[in-house]
Amino acid sequence: MVSTEPKPTSESESSWSNTGLPTLVSQVPQRPGITHLLLFTSLFVPLVFLPYVPLRRYLWQQTRQLEILKSHLGNQLSVTKENSKKLAAAIQENQQLRQEIRSLRPELQKLGDALEELKKENREKEVRDLSQTQWNQEILSAIERMRKDTRPLTPETFKQLSEALVHLAAFVEAEERRYGLHPGLEDESNGVGVMRALAMRLLSVSGMDYTHEEVKKAHTTHTDQDNHTRHYM
């Protein structure tokens, strides 16, 4: 015969909540290890993920700065490429200019030689001009001295000088005839002819016009007079 006596119930199973409902704690098996693990996890996991928020913000800022830097570097790269093209063009132009300068160097050398020659000619011309100026000054000084020296001369003085030359020419011709040195030809280039021409010029300066024949006649007359005087001496 089976006993129908009710089993004694535990105090936990008969516990009720304040609301009149049975608590769930009585329904969960009591396992202290799992409880500790859950408690540790609930406390540690938030602590682990707590630095992630500022770290993520920092990484986002760094990513933003990298994007800005990338854009800036792209612009700088474009500018660098453009400058490289300009530099290459400038180098090519410089090479062309250098080639042109090399081709012009012989012409420049010729031009320099011509310039030096021109400078040399200018220096020589300056020396010649200076010499000519000095010579002109000397000539002017000599003319001025002659002008001062001839200022007291009168037509009568020129006439006397002419007569003296006529007498001198007659004496020279007589001596030439005496010693057989007279050529016997009418040569006006000898000493007698030169003195006769100078006598004519002096007579012209004195204002007395004589022809060549008249001077020659006077010359002959003076020669005959000298011969006659020498004969009686």
Image (tube, rainbow, N blue to C red):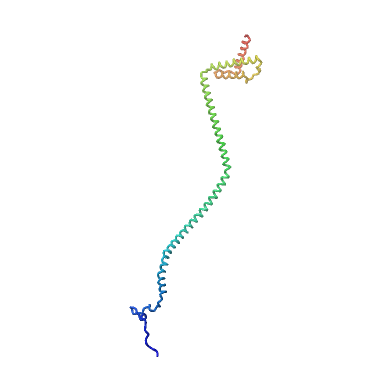
Q: Is residue 212 above or below residue 86?
A: above
Q: Whole-percent x and y of residue 101? A: 56, 45
Q: How many marks?
A: 0
Give residue 4's position: percent from left, percent from top: 38, 88
Which corner quadrant of the image does residue 26 belong to?
A: bottom left
Which quadrant: the N terminus? Answer: bottom left
Where residue 139 sits, quadrant-wise, is top right
**In the displayed image of the protein, which residue is found farthest to the top?**
232
Q: Is residue 95 left or right of residue 30?
A: right
Of residues 19 and 11, the one drawn nearer to the viewer in this rendering: 11
In this picture, residue 209 sits left or right of residue 3: right
Question: Outermost residue toward the left?
Answer: 18
Give coordinates of residue 32: x percent, y percent.
Answer: 40, 75
Q: Nearer the viewer, residue 123 or 197?
A: 123
Q: Is residue 74 left or right of residue 107?
A: left
The C terminus is located in which quarter? top right
Q: Position of residue 213 (x, y in %)?
A: 61, 17
Q: Nearer the viewer, residue 20 or 156?
A: 20
